[in-house]
Amino acid sequence: MGKDVIIACDFASGQQTLEFLGQFGEKKPFVKIGMELFYSEGPQIVRQVKERGHKIFLDLKLHDIPNTVKKSMNVLSGLDVDMTNLHAAGGSKMMQAALEGLTRPDGRRPILIAVTQLTSTDSETLKNELLINTPMEETVMSYAANAKRSGLDGVVCSPLEAAAVHERCGAGFLTVTPGVRFADGEVGDQKRVMTPAEAKKAGSDYIVVGRPITASEDPAAAYERCVREFVD
Ligand code: C5P
């Protein structure tokens, strides 16, 4: 599985998304469709983007009882997405059920990755609200190891955690990493960032890049810069 740049298409409408992707011409970047766009446009937006030749990471972070997750993953697999995700906090039975639901009759399935702890959850919240007394880093690594044991392909994590995840779960266990910024770019609300080149050195398998591309005056050039720094 090669390294790739995934563009986070955090747009409110399908029209905006398709106009944005039209700027890439013959290039067909891997795109991430998240909850906002999916809930506003429905499965149709996935079909439309797919028809234009893009690979899709459908970022819906499922977390429910195993039977519900299995059936929902079966629907997503039928949409022909290339990558999707769930919360590792749902436990190994839920993760295994998700894999069953995703697997198509020919045995193939989209890549399935887990969210460990959301980066918006701080150590205080972990301890005082989720009542988890294990330190954050150990919790994240333990959730990643549980995802690996359950048969998943990887985790979403910070590029700063990629090396530790590979050490714990193996080099082939994928790290899909947001929090990427150009060295001369704006950081915005991201706290801990790496450049595409640094993420490559850190061992990220896929970088998820939103605003440095979507808010750029020349998104195609910004995307090419990411590919040059991270993939080439
Ligand atoms: O615009 P930006 O590059 O910050 O976008 C990053 C994308 O990755 C957004 O879609 C954001 O929701 C997502 N993400 C993140 N941090 C996480 C998990 C997902 O930034 N821990």
Image: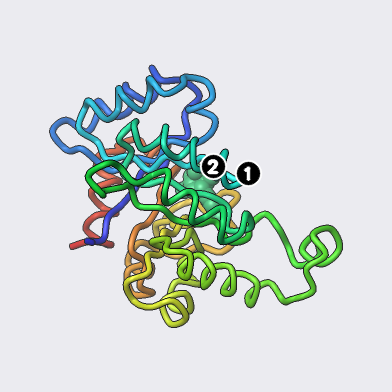
Q: Position of residue 81 (x, y in %)?
A: 33, 38
Question: Where on the picture, by quarter, is residue 23?
Answer: top left
Looking at the image, is 129 positioned above or below residue 74? below
The circle on residue 169 is none
**Residue at (34% x, 58% y) in the render:** 206
The residue type indicated by label 1 comes to Asp
Evaluate if marks 2 and 1 touch, with contact meaning CB atoms under 8 Å apart: yes
Mark 2 is surrounded, within 10 Å at the Cα level, by few (under 14), some (14 to 19) or many (20 or more) other residues, namely many
Which residue is the site of mark 2?
A: 69
Residue at the farthest left position? 26
Name the foreground residue: 29 vs 193: 29
**Residue at (47% x, 42% y) in the render:** 59
| Local secondary structure at mark 1 | loop
Q: Position of residue 95 (x, y in %)?
A: 51, 55
Which residue is the site of mark 1?
A: 64
The residue type indicated by label 2 comes to Val
Quadrant containing the N terminus in the rendered view: bottom left
Left or right of residue 185: residue 224: left
| Local secondary structure at mark 2 | helix
Residue at the farthest right position? 128
Looking at the image, is 5 positioned above or below residue 68? below
Ligand 1 within 8 Å, label 1 CB = no
Alpha-carbon distance for marks 2 and 1?
6 Å
Ligand 1 within 8 Å, label 2 CB = no
Quadrant containing the C terminus in the rendered view: bottom left
